[in-house]
Image: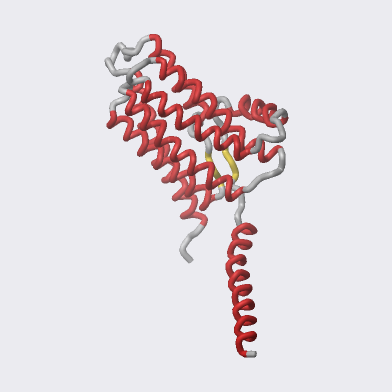
Amino acid sequence: MSSKLGVVKVVVSSRTDRSKQTMPLKQAIQTFKNATRIQESFTSAVERRALLWLAARMPFWIGSDHLTCLGFTAMLLAGASYILARWHSSGLLIATFFLAVNWFGDSLDGTLARVRKRQRPRYGFYVDHMIDSFGGLFLIGGLGASGYVNWPIALSMLIAFLLLSIESYLAAYALGTFRLSFAKFGPTEIRILLALGNIALWFNPKASLPVLSWRLFDFGGIVATSGMAIMVVVAAAWHTMILYKQEPLS
């Protein structure tokens, strides 16, 4: 009899433990709110229409997870293509192709989920931006290994990119707004500039600025690092001021 009671107690306690574990999960799902996306880049209006057009015609068997994986794989291959460019300039054109594939997968996955009403806000936010972080690491690492960008400049770009990402994610959590573009520049504009630089270097691998005699991608890296650093400082100061006003000391 006592053994049966022990089994009953174990079963009841295990069910209670499971219910206790699922309660925080349910609360997290109920309290999680999508941050307001702010996209004001030069290409945002055209890009939005193109993505909606593509999403409406996407085969049913292709889901948003497939597109996410495609975008991530393309970013890894773009970084590998830049490494190839160290020995053969064709790597620059291959990198341009994979940047276009990355745009297709990375930009379309969220649009497809919204059009089909199959959104997973917490999962999508977490996975998408972790992939962006790893993708940035591989892409900028590939640029540094390509020989077209000095390593100190490549590392400064990576640091500035990660700092800007951290600031954006913290603002999404603390303020409920997620900014996808700064000063009219977003991921798509960066891809376009990289693609143009790739084509210019494919025609002339030693392309440089005539005035400063800086190599093309070194100059672009310095400009990108400076721009992202300014964005981080301005955004951090602005958001700190907003939060300070919203939560005054009583």
Residue at x 69% of width, y 35% of height: 61
Residue at the far bottom: name it: 1
Left or right side of 243 for 8: right
Report the colour scheme. Answer: secondary structure
Q: Is residue 103 visible?
A: yes
Residue at x 72% of width, y 30% of height: 56
Residue at x 49% of width, y 22% of height: 192
> Residue 26's quadrant in the figure?
bottom right
Q: Quadrant of the N terminus?
A: bottom right
Residue at the far top: name it: 203
* Count of picture labels: 0
> Residue 165's quadrant in the figure?
top left
Q: Is residue 5 above or below residue 15?
A: below
Residue 90 horizontal/vertical position (percent)? 41, 15
Left or right side of 231 for 29: right
> Residue 30's quadrant in the figure?
bottom right
Left or right side of 89 for 109: right
Residue 60 horizontal/vertical position (percent)? 72, 34
Q: Is residue 227 above or below residue 172?
A: above
Residue 126 horizontal/vertical position (percent)? 53, 47
Q: Nearer the viewer, residue 83 or 228?
A: 83
Q: Nearer the viewer, residue 159 or 250?
A: 159
Residue 29 horizontal/vertical position (percent)? 62, 57
Residue at x 39% of width, y 42% of height: 163
Q: Is residue 11 above or below residue 145?
A: below
Q: Is residue 197 visible?
A: no
Q: Nearer the viewer, residue 102 or 33?
A: 102
